[in-house]
Image: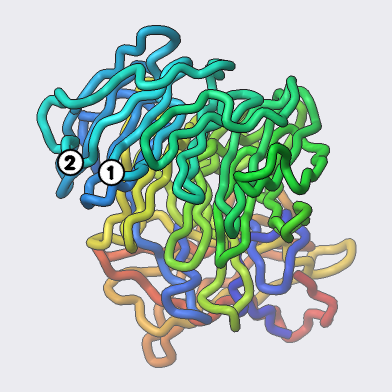
Amino acid sequence: MNIILDKHRGLADSIWSGVDGSYAKAVGVDFHTKPGAIQAHQKLTKDSGATITALCKVAIAVSDGSKLWFSATDGKIWRESSGTYTLKHTTTPASGEAGCLGAAEFNGRIYWATESRLHYIAVASIGADPWAAQVEDNGTFTDTDDTYHPMVVQNNELFIGDKTLLASVDEDFAFTADRFENILTPHRVRILLPFDADILIGTIIADTVNYCELYRWDTIADNWQFADHIYRNGVRAGMVLDEVPVFAVGNRGHLMYYDGQRLRKWKRLPGTYTASAYLDIHPQSMAYFDDRAVIGVSNGSGNPIDEGIYDLGSYSADYPTILSLAFPLSEGVFTGITIGAVIVDGLNLYVAWGEGADFGVDKLDYTAKYASAYLESRVIRLGTHYNQSVNKFFALYESLNGGDLAISYKKNHAGSFTSLTTKDDDTVNSVISEDLPDARSLQVKLEFTVSGNSTPVVEMWGLSPTPTQNNDATI
């Protein structure tokens, strides 16, 4: 019997288990551009040069077409316009740390928050070099949260998280430090998300406390209307996907959707999680891109999962939801990464990142494919307790487009992948391997070699066992 891999359902839950057609690894592979086929994705390229010198956890796509990137540590604010990054201002608040903890555009102004102060500048003035029209210390926070000041615009008002409070700026630019006060210590507001005419308020207590809450508030009443009690350590990040609020909850890869009153289980980012190995997803690391969610996965501790930009969604409602590590960072590493703000502007994707002492902003590059895309199959069990022979591995393609396909294998869970010699049979558009070794179980790996902005397009791939093999192979 042939073992065919042709459904292409993205990441599995582990090397052993997943939905039919899922893979143990899916890195830099595009499942959506040509539904039913697989190819290498466009790559992320560093866009900011040496200009960005700090991690930017907060950023804004401004209505004038530019982007503002705010340092999380030293008060610097950079502006990107037409591909050029310029340092515009360094915030010097009258009190508290200078790192930016939240920002938003509201009513013709850009507002940003540091630990204890709110600042603003008119959108019409952000092109000046350097800034001279900014107004620092426009408002003073009451609880002075030193980590989170999320912002959301709803019902002609700007709301700003401040530990147990929501501050606000109204349409007449009046600042109120205690606009909403019905969240109790030790909760801290980490996420604000619009929902219909309401606001969803996600909290965190600490990484060590497996309890948080999600409130729904109509912005009018003195108290929230619904509260969901969640036994995980924090509502980490959120976004609206096809009109449904989606949240990253806790630091072990749980993604949940909101049904109007409660969070419900949805997907999980697969990883090897322990008490000392966990991820983090920062508040602005999720965005809506090409009808799918993109999720920036950072290292919390111990690197339990490959870090980068994950893609979650489908081509349309007629297709299954697919999860993959679609966009590795330009640094070419998958561990020790912190991903800050993710911005989507049309079909442009921007990602702020930090790796050790290096920082930058990547942009999706439509002139080049990712050069190291690959898939790893789940474990293919060829027998019950003995090795069996396998004939060929094959990959059927539409076109190689000037590139190539490489095939390797791992036998009985031992060691790393071993490369196979292949030949291209262009009479049937198939790349075929030499004989594989006898094995009880195999994993196979398919790697894409690209040519600039061209990539092989694969229809299906799989194993062809020897004619004498029994028919109990499973995947």
Residue 264 figure quarter: bottom right
* Residue beneath the point at 67% across and 45% down: 217
For marks 1 and 2, give the CA distance: 8 Å
Q: Characterize the local packing of mark 2: few (<14), some (14-19) or many (20 or more) Cα atoms within 10 angstroms.
A: few
Horizontal side of residue 419 vs 92, given as left or right = right
Q: Earlier in the sequence, mark 1 or mark 2?
A: 1
Q: Which mark is residue 124?
A: 2
Image quadrant containing the N terminus: bottom right
Q: Secondary structure at mark 2?
A: helix
Q: Residue at x 22, y 23 (%)?
A: 89
Quarter of the image for residue 184 reads top right
- Which residue is at a point 37% across and 54% down the rendered structure image? 344
Residue 233 location in percent, x, y? 74, 32
Please provide percent x and percent y for residue 332: 39, 42
Q: Position of residue 68 (x, y in %)?
A: 28, 38
Kind of residue at disc 1: Gly
Q: Which residue is mark 1?
A: 108
Query: In the image, is 212 to the left or to the right of 88?
Result: right
Quick one: which residue is furthest to the right in this view?
Answer: 385
The vertical placement of 304 against 247, above or below, is above
Report if residue 107 is visible in the image: yes
Q: Can residue 356 be seen by looking at this rendering?
A: no
Q: Mark 1: which secondary structure? A: loop
Camera-side residue of 431 and 16: 16
Tag 1 and tag 2, C-beta contact below 8 Å = yes
Instruction: From the viewer's side, name the closer residue of 431 and 54.
Output: 54
Residue ID at (44%, 81%): 397
Q: Where's the C terminus, which quadrant?
A: bottom right
